[in-house]
Image (tube, grey):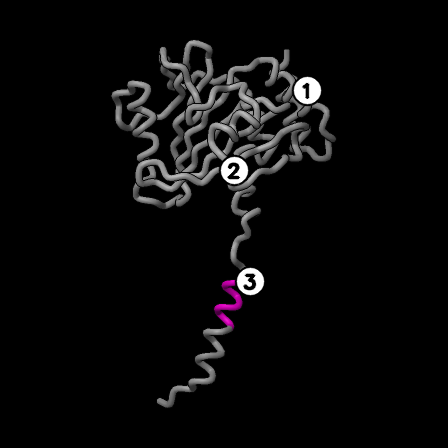
Amino acid sequence: MKLNVNSLWSTIFTFRKKSHRYKISRRDFYEGRNFLNSQERILNLIRQRDINSLSTERQIRFYGLSFGSTQKAAIKHLGKPNYSTKEKFLNEHSILFYRITIGNVQCVLQLHFLKNEFFLGVIEQKNAFSLTDYEIAKLVRNKYGVQDTHWAGIIYDQQQNRVEITEGPVQRIIYSSNNANLYQSIKYQLLQLDDRNNKFSHLRAQVMLDMI
């Protein structure tokens, strides 16, 4: 069979053009990883849960950074971020993103600030299908003295700040502050959002119940 070289090169060139065209942008890469990307996710964060929990005497900090730190202090501690953004759901909510390697695992750190106060940190593996998905969770368990190598749940410190080891296709370690005033402010902001559809009407009812 005669090979049509011109047709072959045309196919390769078109494929390369399409690949380049659909390459994910830097903005989409980071903002697509935003942990607080919906009102439901925000509400789930500020609810107090006590499912499969443990306590520790060690102070819970996120990559060496204490809750309540300013954005300037975070940048001084971690260096210039790979990306930063301001979010639309909450007023004065900003996020710093860092790409780092922990052990042999490539990760993305995201640090959330409200009114310039650090209240949420997330460690997420870059590759959702990596064979080393649970290496980070293993390090966290060792740090806080969890003996069960497959344990998942929430660890509280003496100030009720928490770190959560999650299960699922995407491995995340979630660090969150126990700042009651800050979470009350978030609840009020959720209530002030426009009630545009039935789904949010249900969310609004949940927020009001949480505030009673």
Sequence-wise first label, 3 or 2: 3
The correct choice, above or below, for 144 with respect to 74 in the image is above
| Label 2 residue SS | loop
Determine the image quadrant of residue 22.
Answer: bottom right
How many marks can you see? 3
For the point 46% across and 23% down, the residue is 65
Q: Taking 186 as reference, is 81 left or right?
A: left
Q: Tell me the kind of residue under disc 1.
A: Tyr
Residue range of the region highlighted in magenta in the rendering? 14-20
Q: Taking 60 as reference, is 86 left or right?
A: right
Q: Tell me the kind of residue under disc 3.
A: Arg
Q: Position of residue 101 (x, y in %)?
A: 37, 39
Using the numbered discs, state the Cα–Cα distance from disc 1 to disc 2 in whole angstroms: 30 Å
Query: Which is more foreground, mark 1 or mark 2?
Result: 2
Q: Which residue is mark 3?
A: 21
Sequence-wise first label, 1 or 3: 3
Q: Which residue is mark 2?
A: 81
Badge 1, how many Cα within 10 Å: few under 14, some, many 20+?
Answer: few
In the image shown, does 186 or 26 lie closer to the viewer? 26
Q: Which residue is mark 1?
A: 188
Using the numbered discs, state the Cα–Cα distance from disc 3 to disc 2 in whole angstroms: 26 Å
For the point 67% across and 25% down, the residue is 190
Query: Which is more foreground, mark 1 or mark 3?
Result: 3
Determine the image quadrant of residue 166.
Answer: top left
Residue 169 seen: no
Query: Which is more foreground, mark 3 or mark 2?
Result: 2
**Principal SS element in the magenta part?**
helix
| Label 1 residue SS | helix
Sequence-wise first label, 1 or 2: 2
Q: Position of residue 132 (x, y in %)?
A: 30, 40
